[in-house]
């Protein structure tokens, strides 16, 4: 299993998964972390900019954990076979361990209603 965690500052779980360009990637065997590496994307590779066209460096992950993501992005991840999760947890290693134990605290995807970020009825990172 492969898990990606948004971490723009390389220390904490950050929000706005669509614009995030730094992810901790965890390779998991059962409940054991085998490897942890940092993936840094170019601006045009962010989920916000890539719009799902062609292959993506996050292809092949099973779970994406973030401090915030829109409902549209969660649906897009789902269509890619990726389980998108929003959590209030701020520490990447703890979030992965909690996910593996089935105890990760979950939040709700953002609806973006009324926040001025709509573009023709869709948030830019989510279409």
Image (cartoon, rainbow, N blue to C red):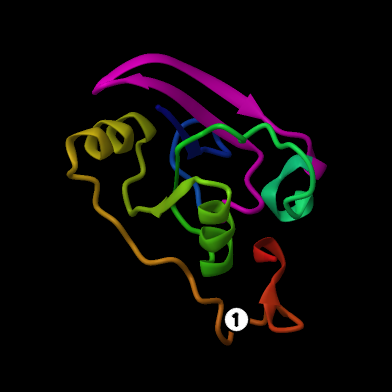
Out of 43 and 3, give the one closest to the viewer.
3
Does residue 47 appear left or right of residue 28 in this picture?
A: right
Position of residue 20 relative to residue 38, above or below, is below
Range shown magenta: 16-44
Residue at 33% x, 62% y is 107
Q: Residue at x 50, y 29 (%)?
A: 24
Residue 40 point in image, percent of width and height: 67, 29
The residue tagged 1 is 115
Residue 26 shown left or right of residue 30 in the figure: right
Which secondary structure, mark 1? loop
- Return the x and y of residue 5 as percentages of the image width and height: 47, 37
Q: How many marks?
A: 1
> Most extreme residue toward the top, as rendered?
34
- 40 in magenta: yes
Q: Position of residue 94 (x, y in %)?
A: 28, 33
Residue shown at 76% from the left, 83% from the top? 120
Q: Quadrant of residue 122?
A: bottom right
Give the class, few, some or many, for how many residues have Cα within 10 Å of label 1's Cα (few <14, many ≥20).
few
């Amino acid at each position: 299993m492969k898990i990606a965690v948004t971490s723009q500052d390389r220390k904490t779980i950050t929000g706005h998964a669509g614009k995030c360009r730094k992810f901790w990637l965890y390779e998991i065997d059962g409940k054991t972390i085998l490897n942890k590496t940092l993936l840094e994307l170019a601006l045009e590779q962010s989920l916000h900019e890539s719009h799902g066209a062609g292959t993506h460096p996050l292809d092949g992950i099973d779970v994406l954990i973030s401090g915030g993501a829109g409902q549209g992005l969660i649906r897009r991840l789902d269509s890619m076979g990726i389980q998108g999760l929003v959590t209030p947890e701020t520490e990447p290693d703890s979030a992965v361990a909690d996910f593996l134990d089935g105890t990760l605290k979950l939040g709700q995807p953002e609806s973006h209603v009324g926040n001025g970020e709509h573009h023709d009825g869709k948030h830019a990172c989510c279409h």
